[in-house]
Image (spheres, rainbow, N blue to C red):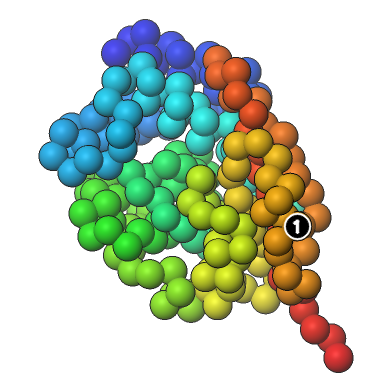
Amino acid sequence: MSDLRQQLEQGANKLGLSLSAAQYDKLMGFLDLLQKWNKVYNLTSVRDPQEMMALHMLDSLAAVPALQRHVASLGKAVGERTAQLDVGSGGGLPGVVFAVCCPDVDVHCVDTVGKKAAFLQQVAVSLKLPNLKGIHARVETLKGPYEIVSCRAFASLVDFTTWSRAAMADHGLWFAMKGKHPQDEIDALGKEVQVFHVEPLQVPGLDAERCIVWAKPVVDTV
C-alpha cells in the first residue's frame, strides 16, 4: 500500500494540491473501503488497486483544483458552507474525493442504486466525513438548492442538465467531468443551458483526454 500512497501523493503534487497527512489518510482509507465493498457490491468493474488509483482516484483528483478555484471565487465568509450535488456517484468517485479535499463543501452523492448510496453513508461514518452524504433517489426528485451540480461519466449533457435542473440553486453551475471534448453533446443542448467553458484536464500518469464542461442555466429575464 505504500507504493499506492506514494503514487497518490506524487499525483496530488503534480496537480498543485496541498493536502494534509490526514487527507491522504482518508483517501487511502477510501481506496481500502472501495476494494473491500467492491467484492460484494460490485461498485466498480475495476478490481486491481493500482488501476483503481490511476483510473479512479487520480482521475477524480484531477478535477479538484478546478472545484477549489470555483468555491474560492464564491467569496464566502469563513465557516460558510457550499452545497454540491454529485449525480450518479456510484462508488463515490468523484464525490468522496471532493468531500475529502474540500472540507468546506457539503457533498451529497445521489445514486439510484441503494447499495451504492449505503456504501457512501458507510464511507462518511468510517472516514469521519460529516460533509459527505449518500442519497438513494432519482436526481429528478431532488430539490436542493445546490450551488454546484457535478457528475463524472454519468450521462449525456442533455440528460444530466435536464434531470438535475430542479436541484440547482438560482446562481448554480453544472460541473461535468468528461473524456474527450464532447462537442456533439454541447451542440445538442437547448437554449436554456449555456456552456461557458470547457476546461482540459491532465490526469497524472494517464495518457487520456479529460475535460470539465462548465455550464449554467439561461434565465429568462422577460
Most extreme residue toward the top, as rendered? 3
* Res. 18 visible in picture: yes
Q: Is 55 positioned to the left or the right of 28 in the image? A: right
Residue type (three-letter) at the residue carrying disc 1: Asp
Residue 96 picture location, percent across and down: 40, 44
Q: Nearer the viewer, residue 26 or 185?
A: 185
Instruction: Examine the rendered structure and indicate whether residue 111 appears above or below residue 64.
Output: below
Question: Which residue does the image show at 43% across and 11% down from the upper left?
Answer: 6
Q: Could you tell me which secondary element the residue under label 1 belongs to?
A: helix
* Quarter in which the N terminus is drawn: top left
Instruction: Examine the rendered structure and indicate whether residue 31 appears above or below residue 164.
Output: above
Instruction: Examine the rendered structure and indicate whether residue 208 appears above or below residue 45.
Output: above
Residue 32 picture location, percent across and down: 25, 28
Q: Which residue is mark 1?
A: 187
Label 1 Cα neighbours within 10 Å, binned few <14 / some 14-19 / many ≥20? few
Q: How many marks?
A: 1
Most extreme residue toward the bottom, as rendered? 222
Q: Is 62 positioned to the left or the right of 24 in the image? A: right
Q: Is 166 positioned to the left or the right of 94 in the image? A: right
Classify residue 38 by image quadrant. Answer: top left
Question: Which residue does the image show at 44% across and 47% down from the upper left?
Answer: 95
Most extreme residue toward the right, as rendered? 222
Instruction: Examine the rendered structure and indicate whether residue 49 appears above or below residue 191.
Output: above
* Res. 21 visible in picture: no
Question: Which residue does the image show at 58% across and 31% down from the upper left?
Answer: 62
Residue 128 picture location, percent across and down: 30, 45
Q: Nearer the viewer, residue 121 or 113?
A: 113
Residue 51 picture location, percent across and down: 38, 20
* Quarter in which the C terminus is drawn: bottom right
Classify residue 215 by image quadrant. Answer: bottom right
Classify residue 65 by image quadrant. Answer: top right
Question: Which residue does the image show at 55% across and 77% down from the upper left?
Answer: 166
